[in-house]
Image: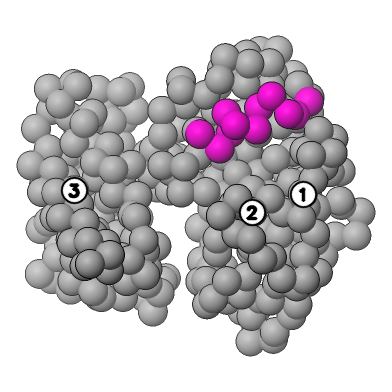
Amino acid sequence: MNIVIVGQGAIGLLWYSKLSQNKALHVRLKCSDKIKDIPKTMSIKELSGQQHSHDMHVASADDLLHADHILFCLKAYDLIGAINSIAPYISKKTSIIMCHNGMVDITKLSKNIQTTQPVFNMLITHASKREQAFAITHTGRGKTELGFAFSNEKIHSQPYAELLTVLEQALGNASWQDDIVEKQWRKLAINCAINPLTTLHNIDNGEVLADKYHQIITLVLQELAAVAHQRGVNLELAQLKENVLTVARQTAKNSSSMRCDYLAKRKTEIDNINGFIHYQGLKHHVATPENTKLWQQITQLTDYAVNKLQS
């Protein structure tokens, strides 16, 4: 099986490291064109504390052409453009796997991708921290969920069992989801609550368990559930809140991806998280004052940080 991973961030390198250990696989990494010097090895600190290095194998045009699966581990705002840019150079049999935070408009994928290729959504709750370029720490064990992004009977006839087995062998706890969209909304709820609060207050995930954050978390989730209902997805507020609190407890010492991006003066995915709820609220005439406020606050905060860095 030939696999290309696009993206050299914390999650992309986690998958590269784990999949590369399976000698039956041909695994390659496609890095950003902005990176000119790619090292010969990458390193990972495992949950056990052990440190490992893996040889770096950079994807070539031939690797893309012969890939069985291409796994895109990118920021939400880069995802669609990256897939469309590669589309002309890959086989129609190649499956596209999207792994990202927040929501993206998959209708903006090229028509060829939408109509001729299997496209999967992947949700992952494993935690990985980027220590420096091509060096990560696996900071939390989680699960992987996979499902089709589009409803297409022809594409659905393609086998996916072997892919799921490979993912299970790599990181464990992998499962197929017939309704991956609902799962996306549940993950979005967690991101809408934890990410902006940890960023605004510069706190670890577990600190959102404090009583002073309970009301705003509840309001954020109420708005999200109302918007989801308008999109045909029915979510229970009590379950959403329990999911948020569970993740906060399980990742108590971790720093959210948005907070990491802010501290590193990088662009955040706020437009695809709370900003998504804001715009969907406008579209469906649902008031979303708390999500809108968080979206605006993070946007102002991160714009200030970037401008300060550039000045």
**Location of residue 288 (image quadrant):** top left
Q: Which residue is at 13% across, 71% downward? A: 211
Q: Which residue is mark 2?
A: 31
Q: Give the side of residue 254 with respect to residue 172, left or right.
A: left
Q: Position of residue 67 (x, y in %)?
A: 80, 38
- The spot of residue 126 in percent (x, y) is 54, 62
- Residue receiving disc 3: 295
Q: Quadrant of residue 159?
A: top right
Q: Which residue is mark 1?
A: 59
Q: Disc 3 marks which amino acid?
A: Trp
Give the camera-side residue of 35 and 122: 35
Specify the quadrant that holds the C terminus.
Answer: bottom left
Range of the magenta residues?
81-91
Report if residue 279 lies within the magenta region: no
Seen in the picture, residue 147 relative to 295 is either above or below; the reply is above
Q: Is residue 170 visible?
A: no
Is tag 3's residue or tag 2's residue first in the polypeptide sequence?
Answer: 2
* Amino acid type, label 2: Cys
**Residue 282 at x, y percent in the picture:** 15, 26
Q: Nearer the viewer, residue 186 or 100?
A: 100
| Helix, strand or loop at mark 2 | loop
Dot placed on the residue nearer the N-terminal end, 3 or 1: 1
Q: Residues within 10 Å of mark 3 (few under 14, many from 20)?
A: many
